[in-house]
Image (cartoon, grey):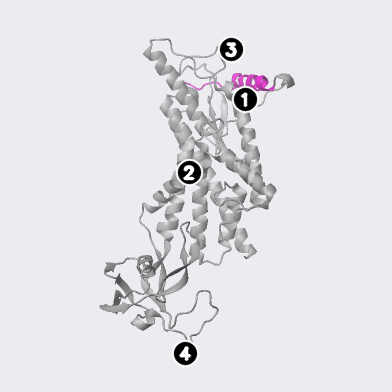
Amino acid sequence: MTVIAFVLGVALLVVGLAISIALHEIGHLVPAKAFGVRVGRYMIGFGPTLWSRRFGETEYGVKALPLGGYISMAGMYPPSPESGSHRAPGADEVRGVDVRVGAEGDAALSAGEGRSTGRFFAAMVQDARTANEETLVGEGDRPFFYQLPVLKRVVVMLGGPVMNLLLAMVFFGIAVTGIGVQTATTTIAAVSACALPAGSAQTDCTPHDPASPAAAAGLQPGDVIVSVAGTPVDTFAQASEIIQASPGRALTVVVDRDGRQQTLQVTPMLAERQVAGPDGRPQTAEVGFVGMTATVEYVHQPLWAGPQAALAQTGQVVGIMWQLPVRVYQTAVDIVTGQARDPNSPMSVVGAGRLAGEVAAGDAPVLNRIAGILSVLGALNIALFVFNLIPLLPLDGGHVVVALWDGAKRTVAKLFRRPPPRPVDATRLVPVTFVVVIALILMGGVLMLADIVNPVQLLG
């Protein structure tokens, strides 16, 4: 493992993550502006601002910690019930609240002063409401976020996660369609002169070694396998499957040699060889063996292969995400006991960076390593997509639930011909948001520690 290649892989992961965060925020920013909501800030990262510039009404910038990002939308929450300033949507006098919607779904309210230590959560709610009363004054007929129709609010909040899903499709698409998948083709690369035992260190044949079935049958490098035992084959894997299942049985092999088809007879011998086990990992088994290898080429997959790979990965991540607390707990146990981590264990950004570095520093061809890093970035964006859909504040999914609940209340009132209800006072959920944030910080800390002291071993 070369240090330079490892560092380059980590750097590519960081750049790709920054792009993912930036586009996540674009997914929130564009529909918010399209629906007329004032967006005060668009920031990549957290902490001290390194660079910023204002274009129109929005300040764009980069902060010191590239672990997320946010946009600030005017009027994410309605005025507090006690303020008495609630008006129908579109009223100029309505005061909104300037909140931050981040790549991790963060919605941050300005902290109030004078918290009561005996009533911590009650003080948090009051702080949020106080911040609400000190927010921006509406400009003309422009709506605040909470005044938008439910569907538009959902579109704004889902814009970020959907952008991550689309970006994952792009990363996977470049990997499998643009670069291609290394595939053993039906073209024979080499034919063994003799049959050597599995795992033998011997490289040259001796007069006592039996001729390989492929050599005895007259197969030659450059032959293109057309069919085996009457079955047409498109890949070397299909030919190998028939051969491995037929030890001691004469097989008819049709090959294309210099543009002309030839029919040969080959009888696979029984031998111990490495084959793929049920879990996809190599294992030793007695199978049919003829002694030939295939030419490996990059095969470009169809355009829909990238989206298919992203959706398949999404299903796997969903299966992991709903068990996240249990899996994080098991990861903590593995740290204490020293047991190897489950390959399906969740990873932090540290783990993803380490994996990207190992891929970049591997012995595989350069295109393979590039495709590997793209796949890591694709998987990371799928994780962001699924994670942000969890229906808890401060995640994007939590804001969607608030919007849907608001819409449900209005629908019920309309059905029963009641006066329109007040908008949902999401500031009441600030204590829940606080608990969720603390839980996420703790789980993230456990995963980061595990990725340092007991990383997932995916590359052996």
Nearest to N terminus: mark 3 or mark 4: 3
Nearest to N terminus: mark 2 or mark 4: 2
Image coordinates of residue 380 in percent, x first then y, are: 52, 48
Q: Can you tell which of label 3 and label 1 is closer to the viewer?
A: 1
Q: Is residue 61 visible?
A: no
Nearest to N terminus: mark 4 or mark 1: 4
What residue is shown with label 1? 431
Label placed on residue 164: 2
The residue sitting at 36% across, 83% down in the picture is 216
What residue is shown with label 3? 82
Local crowd size for mark 3, using a 10 Å CA cut-off: few (<14), some (14–19), many (≥20): few
Secondary structure of the residue carrying tag 1 is helix
Secondary structure of the residue carrying tag 4 is loop
Q: Can you tell which of label 4 and label 1 is closer to the viewer?
A: 4
Residues in magenta, as a range: 120-142
Nearest to N terminus: mark 3 or mark 2: 3
Nearest to N terminus: mark 1 or mark 2: 2
Image coordinates of residue 168 in percent, x first then y, are: 46, 48
Q: CA distance from mark 4 to mark 1?
A: 81 Å
Q: CA distance from mark 3 to mark 2?
A: 39 Å
> Are discs 1 and 2 less than 8 Å apart at CB?
no
Left or right position of 422 against 241: right
What residue is shown with label 4? 207
- Quarter of the picture containing the N terminus is bottom right
Q: CA distance from mark 2 to mark 4?
A: 61 Å
